[in-house]
């Protein structure tokens, strides 16, 4: 995480304007079940967020709080109002390999080569962790400093768990706008994965998404600038760029090579023109 006071370009300028979220976030000041006083103020300072007791929260505010040893995002001052954390606890179960947590269509879209995969839209890191379970090294990029803090906390807890340590150690988390980070990569990745927030449906009767997505929507909104992320990814020497889309959404323009459609999502695979880098498996 960057030091307090560092400005992430994505929090200002076109990125911020393009999103519908931006619900204010506060760090819960010490109360039963909340962060220890010094940890709470250190976190608030690091993220540049106000520190507030539950009694002084306003309705539109999201809350960062520590509960049961994990950093969580709460929908209000009480965990029962809804909470989410980064939880990489998928265990393979008898007879299954850890990589089976990764859905087949995504697995086919990313390919078998075990080089570096850049997850350009890390979110809660679920896909990043599933990719790491398949043996990929994953660079997980996240532009929301709140999500990046949740990811760091989830990774630390996974590193302390003997069953999750190995894949968690293959994940590096970096806070910042992926469009910039992709320009600064030291190594050409095998694949870049883009899973932007979908625009909020306008139908009033649409079913509510899972709580994690509801909170993420309040925090970051819709990633309406996501197509520019595809352009940035194609400009790298990555073997392939995979974009997750709703099954019936229009395909983004670009050098589309393949599409893998699952029940609820579609993975569009683009092959960037990469001189001297033949397409692998
Ligand atoms: C739908 S979520 C990703 C969910 C993720 N695949 C998972 O398994 O949890 C999209 C996330 O991408 C982040 N994001 C969108 N555009 C970004 C960009 N240009 N750079 C870095 N992060 C970005 C958003 O802040 C949000 O947290």
Image (cartoon, rainbow, N blue to C red):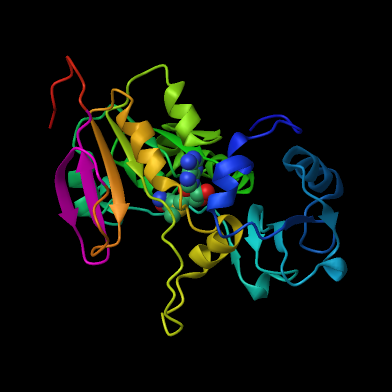
Residue at horizontal 86%, vertical 62%? 53
Residue at horizontal 59%, vertical 48%? 16
Quarter of the image that includes the N terminus: top right
Residue 264 included in the magenta stretch of the image: yes
Q: Is any part of residue 224 visible from this angle?
A: yes
Give how far across and how far down residue 179 sits, in percent: 46, 33
Residue 92 included in the magenta stretch of the image: no
Give how far across and how far down residue 187 sits, in percent: 36, 18
What range of the chain is rendered magenta? Answer: 253-272
Q: Is any part of residue 124 visible from this angle?
A: no
Residue 29 placement: quadrant: bottom right
- Asked whether 30 or 197 is in front, the reply is 197
Give how far across and how far down residue 231 sits, in percent: 35, 35
Q: Is residue 23 left or right of residue 241?
A: right
Give how far across and how far down residue 84 sits, in percent: 57, 61
- Asked whether 203 or 58 is in front, the reply is 203
Q: Residue furthest bottom?
A: 205
Count the marks.
Answer: 0
Q: Is residue 66 left or right of residue 16?
A: right
Q: Is residue 88 left or right of residue 244?
A: right
Quarter of the image that includes the C terminus: top left
Residue at horizontal 75%, vertical 33%? 4
- Asked whether 179 or 240 is in front, the reply is 179
- Asked whether 236 or 80 is in front, the reply is 236
Q: Is residue 107 left or right of residue 27?
A: left
């Amino acid at each position: 995480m960057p030091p307090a006071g560092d400005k992430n370009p994505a929090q200002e300028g076109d990125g911020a304007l393009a999103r519908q979220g931006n619900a204010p976030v506060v760090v819960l000041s010490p109360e039963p079940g909340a962060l220890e006083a010094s940890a709470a103020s250190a976190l608030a300072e690091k993220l540049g967020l106000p520190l507030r007791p539950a009694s002084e929260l306003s309705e539109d505010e999201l809350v960062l709080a520590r509960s049961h040893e994990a950093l969580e995002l709460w929908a209000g001052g009480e965990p029962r109002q809804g909470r989410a954390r980064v939880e990489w606890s998928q265990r393979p179960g008898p007879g299954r390999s850890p990589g089976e947590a990764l859905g087949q269509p995504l697995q086919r879209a990313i390919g078998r080569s075990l080089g570096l995969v850049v997850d350009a839209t890390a979110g809660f890191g679920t896909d990043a962790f599933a990719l790491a379970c398949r043996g990929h090294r994953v660079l997980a990029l996240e532009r929301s400093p709140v999500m990046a803090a949740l990811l760091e906390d989830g990774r630390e807890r996974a590193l302390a768990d003997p069953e999750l340590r190995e894949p968690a150690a293959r994940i590096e988390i970096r806070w910042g706008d992926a469009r910039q980070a992709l320009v600064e990569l030291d190594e050409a990745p095998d694949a870049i994965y883009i899973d932007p927030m979908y625009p909020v449906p306008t139908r009033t009767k649409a079913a509510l998404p899972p709580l994690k997505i509801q909170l993420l929507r309040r925090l970051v909104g819709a990633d309406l600038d996501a197509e520019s992320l595809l352009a940035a990814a194609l400009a790298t020497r990555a073997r392939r760029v995979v974009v997750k889309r709703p099954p019936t959404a229009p395909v983004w323009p670009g050098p589309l090579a393949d599409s893998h459609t699952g029940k609820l999502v579609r993975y569009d695979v683009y092959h960037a023109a990469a001189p001297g880098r033949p397409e692998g498996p």
